[in-house]
Amino acid sequence: MALLGRDPAARAIRRLVEHTPARSSVDVSPDSLALGLVLGSTNESTTVIDLASHAIVRWRVPWPEGVETDLAVFDVVEGQLAADVERDDLAQPEAVTLADLPRRLGTYRGRRVRHWLEQLASPADGPLFGFRGPSAPYWEFRGERPSVALIAADRGPQLLRRHDDGSTWVRFGWFGDDVWLLCEDQHAIRTIEATRRSSLSGKDLATALGFRPTYVLTTLSRPLDGHCYKSCTGLLPRG
């Protein structure tokens, strides 16, 4: 902590995060600037805590073809919303479109982040995203349910590697359900690939990841052949 306190860059990020003017709701004004704390990032969308409202938002980032996201958990990022934020997706009501690639400002973690994650953890109100199974038809969505769920797992999580197709999966228990999700968290995928094991859990998983995974960030995809699919887009520490 002493070293952190003497780091000017760390102090600047802390001041930026802790002195961001509070808002009661997410500002989705066209062309406006937004600050976010990254929870998970894929090329389809980047999930952030909006630092003004402390709500979860999904950013559609216009990554160039062939360029993979390089954003990591707890990165502090700044993005400019597009002139058309495209808030009409009924399957992803939290999603907004950025005009350009977000700017990484630094990282931030600690007690405030732990508090935010505790507050944002999804309550048990039925099956994940309101339906059982891996997907649901796009035409069934009405914009009434979030497309992001931050899960504090009852059991696990466990990371699994399928050698037949090379896919990585996350398995966890949540209020009586045994949930299996395709993993899109690149850090988790690289971790299990490096171990050359077919499964990781408990202390082995925590050692390999470099932290104890407390939360599973789950999201709904854009329509693929008319269906939106559940996936894991992040394994997160407590904060």
Image (tube, rainbow, N blue to C red):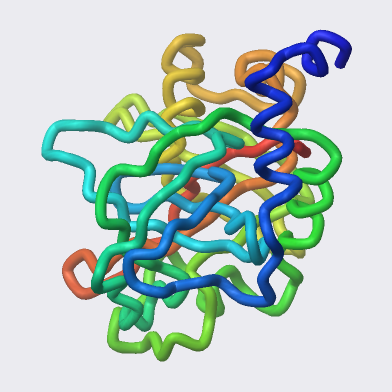
Q: How far across and down, in percent of the image, does residue 239 sit?
A: 76, 37
Q: Is residue 77 above or below residue 56?
A: above
Instruction: Name the side, left or right, on which 85 lies relative to 145.
Output: left
> In the picture, residue 205 is in which quadrant?
top right
* Residue 202, quarter of picture: top right
- Which residue is more in the foreground, 123 or 111? 111
Q: In which quarter of the image is residue 155?
A: top right
Query: Is residue 132 rendered to the left or right of residue 209?
Result: left
Residue found 51% across the figure and 88% down from its top = 144
Q: Residue at x 62, y 47 (%)?
A: 216
Q: Which residue is drawn at 31% across and 82% down?
A: 88
**95 or 79, which lies in front?**
79
| Side of 6 where 17 appears, left or right | left
Residue found 31% across the figure and 71% down from its top = 85
Most foreground residue, 154 or 232: 232
User: In this rendering, is residue 95 above or below 14?
Assistant: below
